[in-house]
């Protein structure tokens, strides 16, 4: 055994002996005074609850960290197919622009499908009602032929995960 292990074993034995002495002393005192026994029992319970809480906190932190890493791994896994398609497109040295366009469209569709699997949805379409919780109006026009607070142009789509907005849509509104 290494010196550190031996020292730890000796410390454990010493701690155990000290605890046993404390218990014996507490038992002797408890026999003498019932209030002392109750006080010692309460102290013991308090120490146990404190230790349980510390263990719970450590376990909760570890679970939180693990769940975050698991979620990130799943998100990256979903997007790796898109990265592979883009790498193939860049490696292709032919001047086939129609094929390149089709490949980009397929890659885009794959990315949107990956987003849907992850719970990410796009929003912000022409004709929708403007909602400041979901849209960022960067331009405004007055047009009597359109209703109030209607989106006329979308400069950048917005995205949300479930109901949490990741990025608001950048739009132009009317009236």
Image (cartoon, rainbow, N blue to C red):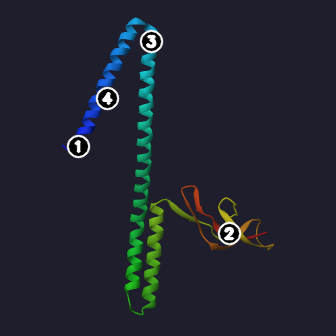
Callouts 1 and 3 close, C-beta under 8 Å: no
In the picture as drawn, the residue positioned furthest to the left comes out as 1
Between disc 1 and disc 3, the foreground one is 1
Between disc 4 and disc 3, the foreground one is 4
Q: In the figure, is residue 77 to the left or right of 173?
A: left
- Which of the numbered marks, if any, corresponds to residue 127? 2
**Element assignment for label 4:** helix
- Which of the numbered marks, if any, corresponds to residue 165? none
Mark 1 → mark 3, Cα distance in angstroms = 41 Å
> Mark 1 vs mark 3: which is more N-terminal?
1
> Mark 4 vs mark 2: which is more N-terminal?
4
- Which of the numbered marks, if any, corresponds to residue 15? 4
Between disc 2 and disc 1, the foreground one is 1
> Mark 4 vs mark 3: which is more N-terminal?
4
> Mark 2 vs mark 3: which is more N-terminal?
3
Mark 2 → mark 3, Cα distance in angstroms = 78 Å
Between disc 4 and disc 2, the foreground one is 4
Residue on which disc 1 sits: 3
Q: Nearer the viewer, residue 146 or 49?
A: 49
From the top left corner, tell me how far across and down residue 156 is, in percent. Answer: 61, 72
Mark 4 → mark 3, Cα distance in angstroms = 23 Å
> Mark 2 vs mark 1: which is more N-terminal?
1
**Element assignment for label 1:** helix
Residue on which disc 3 sits: 36
Q: Nearer the viewer, residue 149 or 48?
A: 48
Location of residue 53 with respect to 91 vertically, above or below = above
Mark 2 → mark 1, Cα distance in angstroms = 76 Å
Mark 4 → mark 2, Cα distance in angstroms = 75 Å
Give the position of the N terminus as an image quadrant. Answer: top left
């Amino acid at each position: 055994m290494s010196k550190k292990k031996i020292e730890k074993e000796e410390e454990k034995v010493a701690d155990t002996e000290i605890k046993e002495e404390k218990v014996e002393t507490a038992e002797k005192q408890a026999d003498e005074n019932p209030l002392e026994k109750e006080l010692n029992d309460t102290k013991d319970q308090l120490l146990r609850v404190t230790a349980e809480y510390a263990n719970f906190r450590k376990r909760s932190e570890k679970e939180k960290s693990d769940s975050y890493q698991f979620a990130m791994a799943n998100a990256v896994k979903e997007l790796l197919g898109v990265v592979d398609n883009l790498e193939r497109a860049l490696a292709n040295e032919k001047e086939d622009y129609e094929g390149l366009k089709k490949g980009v469209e397929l890659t885009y569709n794959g990315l949107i499908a990956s987003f849907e699997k992850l719970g990410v949805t796009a929003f912000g379409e022409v004709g929708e009602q403007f909602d400041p919780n979901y849209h960022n109006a960067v331009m405004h026009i007055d047009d009597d032929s359109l209703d109030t607070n209607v989106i006329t142009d979308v400069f950048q789509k917005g995205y949300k995960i479930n109901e949490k907005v990741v990025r608001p849509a950048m739009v132009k509104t009317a009236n």
